[in-house]
Image (cartoon, rainbow, N blue to C red):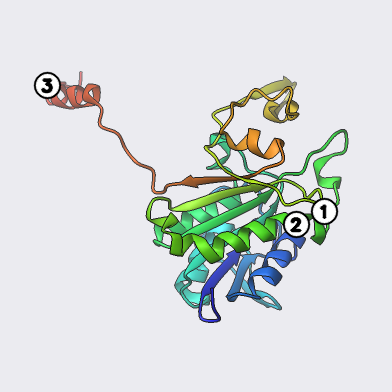
Amino acid sequence: MSDDFEILLTNDDGIDSTGIRTLYDALSEHANVTVVAPAGDRSACGRSISHEVEVDDHELGYAVHGTPADCVVAGLAELGPFPDLVVAGCNKGANLGEYVLGRSGTISAAVEAAFFDVPAIATSLYVPVDDTPFEDVEITAEDYAEATRVTTYLAERALEAGVFEHAAYLNVNVPLPDGEPAPLEITRPSKRYEMDAERDGAHVTLHDRVWDEMTPDALPDPPGTDRRAVVEGKVSVSPLTAPHSTNHHEALDALADDYDGVRLE
């Protein structure tokens, strides 16, 4: 990267979060970084989009009163110089598995960039929790050291290496630093899905059981998946595509051929 290399930086935790500040500081040493990020926490909002949003000037760039997808559209189309790369993160909390891809605001920012034909990196920090509620876990700038290291490394090298000729974006999940640099593993999203629901009168509580088994010995996810890699202390990098692809289905072709003969009763 050089001073004329442009990065649009966003997230879903909000522009004042520690994760985006640490990435801004690291990436700004190598490139021109424009921040366009939500004014507040918009976690798990997916690719929700707004018709109109307010924008405030911020010391890092622009605070948008909207979603990460809003930020990417506004940043690419209006607020900043058109970038060479979009970076989303660093998110407090991992974004692992196929079922998360459409739910995460961090991932959705990268997907939005893909529709503009801009390569993107989405970076998230895996934060193990025991009995402490996730929102009460304190994460410092030092805890993002591995995340900033790998994101800067990929931002510097992935484009020139031709990575984005085959992938629209990279979903990066990083363990907390333990004193030694973590190895990097190229992974695929886990297919594991364990959502359920429980009714109590007028309320239904949704439970994500995936997080109940997150130790290397108990983890059912197979080798090569993003969840297993990060639980084993590795940096997980999943190269992913967007827009979604379609497959040829002979059964649907047959239904289409028969459709003209169907009459409404």
- Residue at the image position 68 percent from the left and 69 percent from the top: 26
Q: Is residue 214 above or below residue 100?
A: above
Local secondary structure at mark 1? loop
From the viewer's perspective, is the residue at label 3 or at label 1 nearer?
Answer: 1
Q: Can you see residue 167?
A: yes
- Earlier-in-chain disc, 3 versus 1: 1
Residue 207, quarter of the rendered image? top right
Q: Can you see residue 62?
A: no
Label 1 neighbour load within 10 Å: few <14, some 14-19, many 20+:
some
Residue 244: x percent and y percent?
A: 39, 43
Screen quadrant of the N terminus: bottom right
Residue under pointer 1:
139
From the viewer's perspective, is the residue at label 2 or at label 3 nearer?
Answer: 2
Q: Nearer the viewer, residue 57 or 178?
A: 178
Q: Amino acid at mark 3?
A: Gly
Left or right side of 125 for 86: left
The mark found on residue 23 in the picture is: none
Q: Is residue 209 above or below residue 62?
A: above
Q: Is residue 169 above or below residue 245?
A: below
Left or right side of 216 for 114: left
Disc 1 and disc 2 in contact, CB within 8 angstroms: yes
Residue under pointer 3:
261
Residue 140: x percent and y percent?
A: 83, 58
- Residue at the image position 85 percent from the left and 34 percent from the top: 130
Residue 96, quarter of the rendered image? top right
Q: Amino acid at mark 2?
A: Tyr
Residue 126: x percent and y percent?
A: 72, 44
Q: Amino acid at mark 1?
A: Ile
- Earlier-in-chain disc, 2 versus 3: 2
Residue under pointer 2:
144
